[in-house]
Amino acid sequence: MSKTIAINAGSSSLKWQLYNMPEEEVIAKGIVERIGLNDSIFTVKYGDGQKFEKVEDIPTHELAVQMLLDELINLNILASYDEITGVGHRVVAGGEIFKESVVISEEVLKKIEDLAELAPLHNPANAAGIRAFKAILPDITSVAVFDTAFHSTMPPVAYRYAIPTEYYEKYGARKYGAHGTSHMYVSQKAAEMLGKDIDEVKIITAHIGNGASITAVRHGRSIDTSMGFTPLAGVMMGTRSGDIDPSLIPFLMEKEEITDVNEMIEVLNKKSGLLGVSDTSSDMRDIIQARKEGNEKAQLAFEVFTDRIRKYIAQYFAVLNGADAVVFTAGIGENSNWVRTAVIEKMSWFGMEIDESKNVFGVEGDISTPDSKVKVLVIPTDEELVIARDVERLKRFE
Ligand code: AMP
């Protein structure tokens, strides 16, 4: 039995999940938060509900990985490092280069770093995670799983922007999308749940977490998605604006006397979305609580958020010429019946109706009425499992 670890590295965090493969059994999982800041938080969940937590300064990703491996041994989860035979890394942007998961060589890693233009917040952090593991476990199979790969099947009509062709040809200025691993996983699960072959179904997947995107999936292939050149586009998110008129950028820069365009993009990435409109929080739980207490800005933030999701779903009914199911997944999609109801209640014309007795916290599966022509499904995503499976698959080719 070999062990595989799935890694999702952010700029100040490292989320991980350790599997026995090929059994796909989760042995332990955890997160290191606040890497590079004071009082980093290191958490491990394992066994039957055991939890280990410590708080200390962890200045780099490499130290976070070292601490993680040491702690897995201290907690008797591993007998030695050698038990880990593979590591899979989530990488947000694969551009037009990576259309599927790959074994990471030095050349691949260099390309991932070069693709930082497409995901400036994510790729450098993903690469830092990869380098940290390479330094400590240089001999194990190391695989990159790209968020954009599932969207590589999009046709030009979906991925091209209506800007001069030479910008696409010279610089790859096009839509790439993200969250592909999640959209792929839940669309396959949805086909299973509908009792149909993936080649027969049309599914609209709504990955709604702190980051959010909607995808049109025809016969198992992504044919359009809401995120764009970078993950900033599409629906409104926790702190990202989603689609806006690009003319607002120079206008606001002038009014606010912002001279560096990166500063403006930072506002759109980190200070907008739920946080920007509500002036309260980027976290949907706080928004729901605040609107219950009569906070009007939080109410508006909730309404704009659900309006944008509904509009993208409606677009994708047109792109797909109808759909068999709409799937909700990720932190908000899986957990918030309020959001699901608000999105779907104005879509009865599209043949969707939620059975509110099923639409409760913790539900999984079909939440629509028997008469609902289009099924509304809640499916927990599992990007880590897809990553572990890809490591297992690619190990054979090493
Ligand atoms: P993710 O990025 O997928 O981890 O999702 C994070 C988002 O899920 C945050 O906005 C959370 O507030 C939201 N979330 C988690 N649990 C709930 C819940 N019970 N109700 C509403 N939102 C939730």
Image (tube, rainbow, N blue to C red):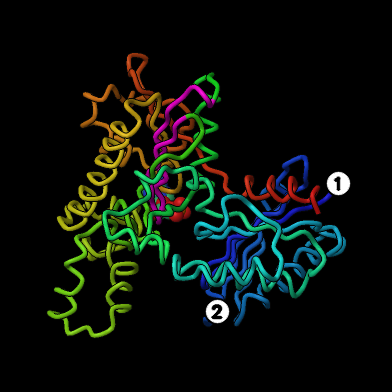
Q: Which segment did they paint magenta?
A: 198-218
Left-right relation of 219 to 8: left
Q: Which residue is mark 1?
A: 1
The quarter of the displayed image where residue 7 is located: bottom right
Q: Relative to the observer, which residue lies in front, 145 or 83?
A: 145
Callout 1: few (<14), some (14-19), or many (20+) C-alpha neighbours within 10 Å? few
| Quadrant location, the C terminus | bottom right
| Image coordinates for residue 149, horizontal then vertical, percent | 54, 50
Provide the secondary structure element on which disc 2 rests. loop
**Residue 263 lies in magenta, yes or no?**
no
Provide the secondary structure element on which disc 1 rests. loop
Left-right relation of 190 to 233: right
Left-right relation of 390 to 329: right
Q: Residue at x 53, y 82 (%)?
A: 38
Name the kind of residue labelled 2 in the image: Asp
- Where 348 falls versus 149 (above or below)? above
**Residue 209 lies in magenta, yes or no?**
yes
Q: Which mark is residue 39?
A: 2
Q: Which mark is residue 184?
A: none
> In this orientation, does residue 219 appear?
yes
Name the kind of residue labelled 1 in the image: Met
